[in-house]
Image (cartoon, rainbow, N blue to C red):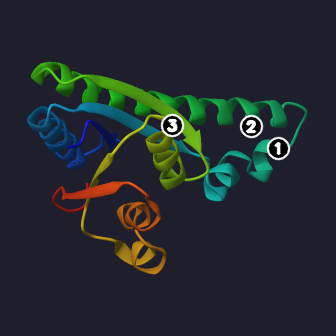
Amino acid sequence: MYKNILLPTDGLGKCAYGTCHGVLLAKELNAKITAVHVTGKLTAREILNIYQPATLTGSSGGKKAQEDMAQVEEARKELGAKALESAERMCTEVGVACETVQITEKSPEEGILKVAREKGCDLIFISTHGNPGVMGSLFGTLATKIMTQSKYAVLTHYCGGPS
């Protein structure tokens, strides 16, 4: 039925449990996993924290801010690499083929849908906390955005509350 399951992962908290369920589903279906981690663009708040007026004063302020920005971006890439390593390890343990993709996009939903299209995925397996909070209630959760924008089948998995 499904041969290439896209498995978005952030590798954090309780949703690592969701990754495990996606891998087990792939094993039962004899499908491949395409694990993806989308590193979103830095938010305005993150950029403002780096480029504080106090940091920019003096001749070396701009250079320091650029170094800080590079450190933040590198830390985010390392987090993504760890999340993908975890998914790949789970796949290896149960004998499921796994391809990993780490990309940077404007938003996680854009990245997830882009990878699904480019890698020929036929199912997106996404975990949700089930607790949208104020922002999720106002603007929609990632799972909701994927379900409403996807041209592919989407299976949501409740991973047990906020992580």
Viewport quadrant of the N terminus: top left
Viewport quadrant of the C terminus: bottom left
- Residue 105 position, x and y percent, is 59, 45
Q: Residues within 10 Å of mark 3 (few under 14, many from 20)?
A: few
92 left or right of 109 in image: left
Residue at image x 43%, y 72%?
140
- CB under 8 Å between discs 1 and 3: no
Residue at image x 15%, y 59%?
160
- Mark in front: 3 vs 2: 3
Tell how many labels: 3
Mark 1 belongs to which amino acid?
Leu
| Looking at the image, residue 111 lies above or below residue 95 | below
First in residue order: circle 2 vs circle 1: 1
- Residue 21 position, x and y percent, is 14, 43
Q: Which residue is mark 3?
A: 118
- As helix, strand or loop, the secondary structure at mark 3 comes to helix
- Mark in front: 1 vs 3: 3
- Residue 6 position, x and y percent, is 34, 41
Say which of 31 and 159 sits in front. 31
Say which of 154 and 72 sits in front. 154
Q: Which residue is mark 1?
A: 56
- CB under 8 Å between discs 2 and 1: yes
Mark 2 belongs to which amino acid?
Ala
Q: CA distance from mark 2 to mark 1?
A: 7 Å
Q: Residue 120 appears in which quarter of the rendering? A: top left
Q: Which residue is mark 2?
A: 65
